[in-house]
Image: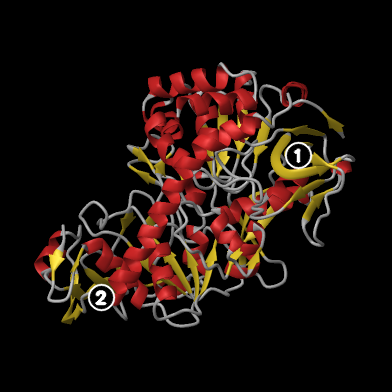
Amino acid sequence: MQFGSLQEVIHQYIHNGQSVALEGFTHLIPFAAGHEILRQKKHDLHLIRMTPDLIYDQLIGAGCARALTFSWGGNPGVGSLHRLRDAVENDWPRPLRIHEHSHAGMAAAYTAGAARLPFGMLRGYVGTDLPGVNPQVRELRCPYTNTAIATVPAINPDVTVLHAQAADRQGNILIRGIVGAQKEAALAASTLIVTVEEIVESLAAPMNAIVLPHWVVTAIAEVPMGAYPSYAHGYYARDNAFYRAWDEIARDREQFTEWITRHVLCSHNHSEFLDSLAEAA
Amino acid sequence: MSIHSSANTYTPDEMMTIAAARLIWPGCVCFVGIGVPSAAANLARLTHAPDIVLIYESGGIGTHPRVLPLSIGDGELAETATAVVSLPEIFSYWLQAGRIDVGFLGAAQIDRFGNLNTTVIGGYSKPKTRLPGAGGAPEIALHAKQIFVVLKQSPRSFVGKLDFCTSAGFLNGNGERAQRGLPGAGPQVVITDMGILKPATRSQELTLVARYENVSVERIRAATGWPLAVADTIDVVAAPTAEELRVLRDLHKRTAIAHAGDARRSRKIPRAAAGQVNV
């Protein structure tokens, strides 16, 4: 486990062509890390996330991804992810291979990955067209009851990136609030990078809170507001107005590219990104 | 568009939300998504069913949101929940294990057997419109003891043939769902902005059983992309009461104010944070 700046950590551990999961189910989405991937112009990534959300809309629109594994690709409560749509519908800015699941299927795949099982299983996908378009979704017979069970191959990302509330000086990680499938995604990965709101002397974690112990963490970077415009429970709320505004920004290719250039590429780090948004407001 | 009744003026969307809320019973364990399902379930909680258990796929069990969440994972849902569990747990121990009474789903397309499409319009590999996709819907449709579907009725949404089946209803009808061993009972009611449909006993084809006042059966037929089956007797759904409208509008008003507050915060938060950042 090492501490480092976000720039160093992304540079050292995320490489072109890798499979990368930036997880966080609506809560604790690692936006700062995603933006740093974009700044460092990582490419040919296989992106994995249950809900691609705005962060993958940005990475896909900027041409960082060759493939996407996902289970729900909308702007929550608002509508479409226009950059994801443009990639799927028109191959812009480049073709995007999609591996599509349901939430339950993807949760089973992460859970299997964390347990180092070859596949996950669920009673799922029955009667739907999803197995017809995703050959990874298959079926086996239970050896005890002979009932049919759907299977999905384990997801084991090369790198998982999370955002969390806090790390202590040893590098133990505390996550609280809506936890999604973060623990599973973290333990399924070969490399685990975590950005945190703050580094503290003691986590003072409630019993049963999610603590990822330091020896499963590869690297930690302290990035206050690192989940913005998503949120960090106990630190700041989700900026629902930003999610609404994104609909208009992302609708048009040129406007999107201008936004990315102005706010992400022309900022050296997350602090400057937040400043540039404040100036524009 | 609004309709004038003797007591109140209301919109078709309000009528749809209120009609859906009335179908929820006290104590019902309800798995809800964002949009009309969330509004209807919370309206029921704030009127006749204060003890319903609202479950959102983000992990909140027994949530009591003061305002409607914009996203499925708003902090409001966690803060007001009895328990917050992980996503794999919600889908396996709660939904798959059969602990949900009603799953509330919307869709872009529905067919006559209540099968739902939220994936694509057009072909899958090069779609005309790429929709968000499955999310929790396929397994909600599979495992909830019954499904309520809420969507606006038009020939574009009520189609003869789905472009893609994301979530199973009665498949091809005539008992196929049960024969293939799907555990839940499937879509037992479809609530639209014009009326209410229920599956016929034998064929399981969706049949119009009720209409809202001032909406004719002919208009509903015209808004359906297949020859619509109509029950022998059509009920007229009672117009919203003054109390239902007041509670629903208060909820939407509180929600709008709360989400506008996010906009003010968003301008402040980055500035405030900039001072704290050590780079």
For the residues beneath circles 2 and 1, the answer to whether they share a chain is no
Residue A43 in percent (x, y) is at 61, 21
Which numbered tag is attached to residue B242?
2
Q: Secondary structure at mark 1?
A: strand
- C-alpha separation, residue under disc 2 versus residue under disc 1: 50 Å
Q: Is residue A140 above or below residue A25?
A: below
Who's the residue at 65% across and 35% down the image? A226
- Which chain is mark 1 on? A
**Label 2: how many Cα within 10 Å (few below 14, some 14–19, many 20+):** few
The quarter of the picture where residue A147 lies is bottom right
The residue that label 1 is drawn on is A198
Residue A47 in percent (x, y) is at 60, 34
Q: Is residue B99 above or below residue A7?
A: below
Q: Is residue A225 above or below residue B73?
A: above
- Image side of residue B191 versus residue B35, left or right: left
Residue A77 in percent (x, y) is at 43, 49
- Image side of residue A214 versus residue B139, left or right: right
- Image side of residue A57 versus residue B115, left or right: right
Residue B47 in percent (x, y) is at 39, 77
Amino acid type assigned to the residue bearing label 2 in the image: Ala
Q: Quadrant of the N terminus of chain A?
A: top right
- Which chain is mark 2 on? B
Amino acid type assigned to the residue bearing label 1 in the image: Glu
- Image side of residue B164 versus residue B136, left or right: left
Q: Quadrant of the C terminus of chain A?
A: top left
Q: Is residue B212 above or below residue A61?
A: below
